[in-house]
Image: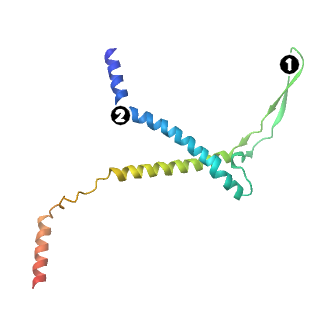
């Protein structure tokens, strides 16, 4: 049991587990910010330009809503329940697609930035590697022909 606890402690303390936890927390917060950006900032002007369409309420109805009555066997009273219409929520889907594009672009830019920062820049004091012997020989032949 002590070995299991020791292994678990080593796993949790490793950087990978902590980095993953931080990434998930920040990713969730970033997702909420992007959802708000799409829903509250981007989609209203697009809807206004398209004639006042509210994308979040854009739906394709499949059935109409109706009331369903049910008789209570004890009281013999009719209980009614409103059944909501069945719809395809295309507007919410469009909002989610736009959020996906924004999140994808943001992740792409972060990865691009990290790769750019990781790339080693050549040091000015490093001399370029010496050319191979055959290139040296060809260079000498070229220089000798020019000298004639």
User: Which label sits on residue 30?
Assistant: none
- Mark 2 / mark 1, whichever is N-terminal: 2
Q: In the image, which is nearer the foreground, mark 2 or mark 1?
A: 2
118 horizontally vs 98: left or right: left
Mark seen at residue 72:
1
Relative image position of residue 134 (x, y in whole percent):
12, 67
Please state the horizontal and vertical placement of residue 23, each as a whole percent of the image.
45, 38
Residue extending furthest bottom?
148
Label tally: 2
Q: What colour-coding does the image apply?
A: rainbow
Q: Residue at x 34, y 14 (%)?
A: 1
Asked if the residue at tag 1 contacts the one at tag 2, i.e. Cβ–Cβ closer than 8 Å, the answer is no
Indicate the secondary structure of the residue bearing disc 1: loop
User: Neighbour class for label 2 at 10 Å: few (<14), some, many (≥20)?
Assistant: few
Quadrant of the rendered image containing residue 66: top right
Query: Measured from the top left, where is residue 55 in percent x and y?
Result: 69, 49
Q: Which residue is mark 2?
A: 15
The residue sitting at 48% across, 39% down in the picture is 26
Q: Viewed as shown, does residue 101 lie left or right of 90? A: left
Residue 68, given in percent of the width and then of the height, sits at 83, 30
The residue sitting at the front extreme is: 125
Say which residue appears at 42% left-offset and 35% top-offset: 20
Closer-to-camera residue (91/64): 91
| Spatial CA span between label 2 and label 1 | 62 Å
Residue beneath the point at 40% across and 36% down: 19
- Using the image, determine if residue 55 lies above or below residue 50: above
Name the secondary structure under disc 2: helix
Mark 1 packing: few (<14 Cα in 10 Å), some, or many (20+)? few
**Horizontal placement of 125 versus 114: left or right?**
left
Residue 123 higher or lower than 28, as above or below: below
């Amino acid at each position: 049991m002590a070995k299991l606890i020791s292994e678990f402690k080593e796993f949790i303390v490793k950087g990978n587990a902590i980095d993953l936890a931080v990434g998930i927390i920040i990713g969730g917060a970033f997702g909420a910010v992007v959802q708000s950006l799409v829903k509250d900032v981007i989609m209203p002007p697009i809807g206004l330009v398209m004639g006042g369409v509210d994308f979040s309420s854009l739906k394709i109805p499949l059935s109409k809503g109706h009331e369903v009555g049910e008789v209570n066997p004890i009281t013999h009273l009719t209980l009614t329940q409103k059944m909501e219409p069945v719809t395809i929520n295309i507007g919410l889907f469009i909002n989610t697609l736009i959020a996906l594009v924004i999140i994808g672009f943001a992740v792409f830019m972060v990865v691009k930035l990290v790769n750019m920062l990781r790339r080693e820049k050549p040091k000015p004091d490093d001399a370029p590697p010496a050319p191979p012997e055959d290139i040296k020989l060809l260079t000498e032949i070229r220089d000798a022909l020019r000298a004639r």
